[in-house]
Image: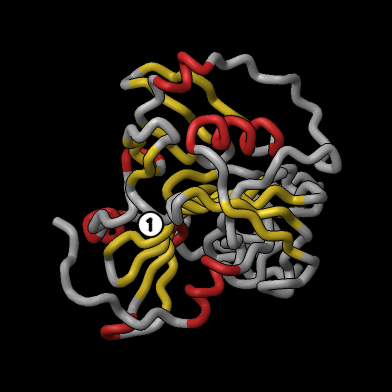
């Protein structure tokens, strides 16, 4: 059952996750981007061929899952399309076709956070944001996605459910998941009534360089890789999910 008490005051570090993006080389957990999708732009490179999805197929989409490295559009239990987060053009184009025209902003290097790359961001109804990076992050992702509501309306007026792995949605109470998760997969901020958490839902975005030391995820006390464990994470206000985002590393210590 979702915690119904008034919203708590969350620490500045957690708020930075919602408004600033850093990609894999994060300071603390600051990899949360002001995520919003971008318009079709010829200046955003893509190595991916066009994904062929008909309007008829898109109209049947009733849920979108944010995974560690992709967005999955589904019709009931059937996958309509699985879009890599390395493909910014297709991610933005499909969301626009399904949800309509987003609001857009241009972000310069450093705006919203010391590690924020230049990007074009778009927001659909305050529910899902995608930051299309002008230069791919070191892990290879070309977008950073944030889910801010549990559902959003399509351009035709139907409702699409938004979730992370395992069906976790904004508004869910994840107290049991937090209790069960190993220390390596969660991080707390603040205390008392201002307590908040970051919970890793699914790992992804492995470092691409050779000098990293892989973390032994079976040992809760070992954190050899100062970039932490990247993937899709949930941010909470106490135990209630407020944001689901990817990429978003937990226990990151390396400065960009």
Residue 200 in sight here: no
Q: How many neighbours does mark 1 have within 10 angstroms: few (below 14), some (14-19), or many (20 or more)?
A: some
* Residue 70 occupies quadrant: top right
* Residue 45 occupies quadrant: top right
Residue 162 picture location, percent across and down = 38, 42
Q: Is residue 57 above or below residue 229?
A: above
Residue 67 in sight here: yes
Report the side of 234 relative to 142 (left or right): left
In the rendered image, which quarter contains the N terminus? bottom left
Residue 153 picture location, percent across and down = 37, 40
In this view, the residue in front, 202 or 210, is 202
* Residue 160 occupies quadrant: top left
Residue 219 picture location, percent across and down = 47, 56
The structure residue drawn at horizontal position 42% and vertical position 48%, both measured from the top left corner, is 201
Report the side of 66 relative to 3 (left or right): right
Residue 125 picture location, percent across and down = 45, 51
Q: Is residue 19 above or below residue 174?
A: below
SS for callout 1: loop
Report the side of 72 relative to 22 (left or right): left
In this view, the residue in front, 187 or 90, is 90
The structure residue drawn at horizontal position 71% and vertical position 61%, both measured from the top left corner, is 25
In this view, the residue in front, 134 or 214, is 134
Q: Is residue 57 above or below residue 46?
A: above
The structure residue drawn at horizontal position 68% and vertical position 56%, both measured from the top left corner, is 24
Report the side of 49 relative to 69 (left or right): right
Colouring: secondary structure
In the rendered image, which quarter contains the C terminus? bottom right
The structure residue drawn at horizontal position 78% and vertical position 40%, both measured from the top left corner, is 41
Which residue position holds label 1? 182
């Amino acid at each position: 059952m979702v915690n119904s008490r008034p919203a708590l005051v969350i620490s500045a570090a957690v708020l930075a996750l919602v408004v600033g993006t850093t990609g894999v080389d994060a300071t603390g957990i600051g990899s949360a981007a002001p995520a919003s999708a971008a318009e079709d732009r010829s200046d955003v490179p893509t190595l991916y061929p066009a994904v062929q999805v008909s309007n008829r197929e898109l109209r049947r989409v009733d849920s979108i899952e944010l995974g560690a490295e992709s967005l999955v559009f589904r019709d009931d239990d059937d996958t309509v399309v699985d879009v890599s987060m390395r493909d910014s053009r297709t991610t933005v184009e499909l969301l626009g076709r399904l949800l309509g025209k987003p609001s857009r902003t241009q972000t310069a290097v450093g705006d919203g956070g010391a590690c924020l790359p230049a990007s074009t961001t778009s927001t659909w109804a305050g529910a899902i944001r995608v930051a299309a990076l002008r230069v791919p992050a070191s892990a290879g992702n070309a977008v950073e996605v944030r889910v801010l509501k549990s559902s959003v309306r399509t351009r035709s007026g139907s409702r699409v459910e938004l979730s992370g792995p395992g069906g976790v949605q904004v508004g869910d109470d994840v107290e049991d998941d937090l209790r069960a998760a190993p220390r390596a997969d969660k991080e707390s901020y603040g205390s008392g009534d201002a307590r908040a958490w970051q919970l890793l839902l699914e790992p992804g975005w492995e470092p691409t360089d050779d000098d990293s030391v892989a973390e032994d995820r079976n040992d809760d006390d070992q954190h050899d890789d100062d970039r932490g464990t990247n993937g899709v994470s949930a941010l909470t206000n106490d135990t209630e999910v407020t944001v689901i985002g990817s990429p978003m590393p937990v226990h990151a210590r390396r400065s960009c």
